[in-house]
Amino acid sequence: MTSTNNRTVDHGRTKVQRAAQVMGIVFLLVGILGFIPGITSNYDTMKFAGHESEAHLLGIFQVSILHNIVHLLFGIAGLAMAKTVSGARNYLLGGGIIYAILWIYGLVIGQESGANFVPLNGADNWLHFLLAVAMIALALLLTRNDRTGARA
């Protein structure tokens, strides 16, 4: 591990790139697991979209085909954007903002309303809050020295 241009580098990747890469892998896995019966309970009730889907990833998080596809795409985006420092930072910051918006959206819509098209339940809402905080914190903390011009 060496220090170059204010960034700790591990096999050519900075910490922020590794964080984006890990998040991308996690989202890919979640997207895949959402399509596996047994890991997703009530799999046979899964709908393409909408609150009518009674499928639950790990028996906790309400999912639909659309929800799983979004996780897969978000994972692919994370892996692609982790190739550069700015891409990784933008992925984490932008993703964190998206999850903060989803958290607020999930809190204000009725879980049985047509507006709950993803679908979202209480567990999803609080996971979105945690993801928002974590992703924004990673983006800001892991690139802090780069923005201030401080030397490591």
Image (cartoon, rainbow, N blue to C red):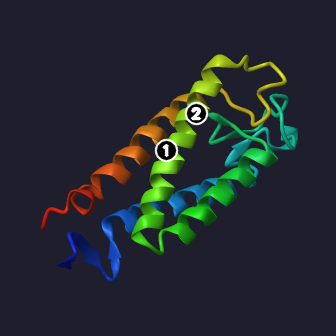
How many numbered circles are shown? Answer: 2
Q: Position of residue 127 (x, y in %)?
A: 52, 35
Could you tell me which secondary element the residue under label 1 belongs to?
helix
Residue 12 bears which disc, if any? none
Q: Position of residue 144 (x, y in %)?
A: 25, 55
Q: Say which quadrant the N terminus sits in.
A: bottom left
Instruction: Name the amino acid type tagged 2.
Output: Ile
**Residue density around tag 2, few if under 14, some if 14–19, many if 20 or more, within 10 Å:** some
The residue under the point 52% across, 29% down is 126
The residue under the point 54% across, 63% down is 78
Q: Can you see residue 88?
A: yes
Which residue was labeled with disc 1? 96
**Image quarter for residue 18?**
bottom left
**Residue density around tag 1, few if under 14, some if 14–19, many if 20 or more, within 10 Å:** many
Position of 79 compared to 68: left or right? left
Position of 42 compared to 24: left or right? right
Cα–Cα gap, marks 2 and 1: 9 Å
- Closer to the N terminus: mark 2 or mark 1? 1
Position of 141 compared to 126: left or right? left
Position of 63 compared to 142: left or right? right
Which residue was labeled with disc 2? 101
Question: Which is more toward the observer, 47 or 40?
Answer: 47
Q: Position of residue 65 (x, y in %)?
A: 80, 48
The residue under the point 29% across, 77% down is 10
Could you tell me which secondary element the residue under label 2 belongs to?
helix
Q: Can you see residue 122?
A: no
The residue under the point 86% across, 38% down is 45
